[in-house]
Structure formats: C-alpha cells, structure tokens
Image (cartoon, grey):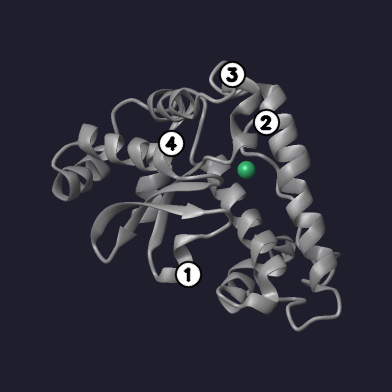
Amino acid sequence: MNKRDTSNSPTAPAASHHVLHPLPYAENALEPIITANTIGFHYGKHHKGYVDNLNKLILGTEYVGLSLEKIIIGTAGRSDKTAIFNNAAQIWNHAFYWKSMKSKGGGEPPAALKQKMESSFGSVDTCKKALSNAAVSQFGSGWGWLVLDSDKLKVVISANADIPLTTGMKPLLAIDVWEHAYYLDYQNRRADYINAVLEKLINWEFALKNAS
Ligand code: MN3
C-alpha cells in the first residue's frame, strides 16, 4: 500500500510517502454498471485526494515511513489523530474497493467461497441479501463489508472511513456507499447501485483469496 511496494527498484526512494496505486482495470472497465465518469472522479479526485492529504498530514510526524496498516491501527480511535486516520483508512478502503470489483464479475462464487457462504449464512443468496441490506441501511457515508471473523463470514457496515481491520476482522470485500461512489450514475438510488455491483461486478475470487 505504500512506497515500500516499489523497493524492488534500486532507485526507489525511502518509504517516506504514500502513492496512488494504479486502478486494477481501465476507468471504463466497469461500464455500464459504473461509468468512466464516476471512476474518473472517484479515483482521480477522491482517492487521490486522500493520498495527497495523508502525505501532507504526516510530514514531520512519527508516522513517516510507516505502512498504511500501521498508521491506521496506530491512529484508530484517537481524537487527536482523526484526520490522519480518516485519510489513511480511506486510501486502504479505496484500494480494496477497486479490487472488490471486476469487469464481468458477479455470478456464481467459486466453490470454496460458496461453501463458506452456505455454512455462515445458509445460502449464497442469503449472504448477498445480507450484504446488500446492510450496505443500503448504512446511514450517511460509509462502507458495506464481507468479513471473516474467526472462521465465520459476516456482514458489517462502517461509517465514514472506519475499517474492520481495527476490530480484528479480516476484510474480504468492500462496497463504497459514499454518495460519490454512485451519485453521478444512480443519483439517490443507492440500492440499485449496490445490487448491480453484487450481480455484475463483485469479485468473488478476490474475496476467496482474502479468506485463504
Ligand atoms: Mn469513495
């Protein structure tokens, strides 16, 4: 998540600041479910903004050179570090969200994930419904998550930048429900956006990889 990822380059500078990693696909790859227009603003302005803000906020602090995860864990719940936490967590959340989707996603989850969904929720449909309902119900800005809690799949929601990592749960998938994620394409129809993501874009292979 941070500059250490470039350490295989002999000219890579020290891990002093965070970078905006490329999207895992082209900006128009998720059309027509999420348009290039939405991704352009969401990635190019919002996600980039969090990276730029974090780099400014940590200048001269003990957080320089730390991984994103260490910054997130170290600032979570600290009222004097809210801005650093928010920007660091939003960088993590967005990088994770982009990978939670892919062109021609959705459909049947891989067998190993399907089995986990059935043992935790009874069926794949119940699991998807739980995730959809939770994400729709989040009041205001936030995130819908599929997580692994011990060995059980769970659906959780988080407000604003909050992230299940700080409570010991392992994120498998994230759905951004901030209005900037869907308003240009769906206006106020958050449920339509979420259900379209779950049916057409969700990357079950990514979830399985995170669960292993
Ligand atoms: Mn967002």
Q: Residues within 10 Å of mark 3 (few under 14, many from 20)?
A: some
Position of residue 176 in the picture relative to residue 129 (left or right): right
Mark linked to residue 203: 4
Residue linked to disc 1:
166
First in residue order: circle 1 vs circle 2: 2
The crowd level at tag 1 (other Cα within 10 Å; few <14, some 14-19, many 20+) is some
**79 horizontally vs 147: left or right:** right
Give the mark toward the camera: 4 or 3.
3
Disc 4 and disc 3: Cα gap in Å? 15 Å
| Amino acid type assigned to the residue bearing label 3 in the image | Glu
Please give left or right for residue 4 compared with residue 144 in the image: right
In the rendered image, the vertical position of residue 107 relative to residue 82, given as above or below: above
Q: Is mark 2 within 8 Å of ligand 1?
A: no
Residue wearing tag 3 = 31
Mark 4 and mark 2: span between their CA atoms?
A: 17 Å
Q: Quadrant of residue 57?
A: bottom right
- The one nearer the camera, 5 or 210, is 210
- In terms of sequence position, does the residue under pointer 4 or pointer 2 come before the other? 2
The residue that mark 2 highlights is: 39
Q: Residue 156, how many percent across, how many down?
A: 37, 53
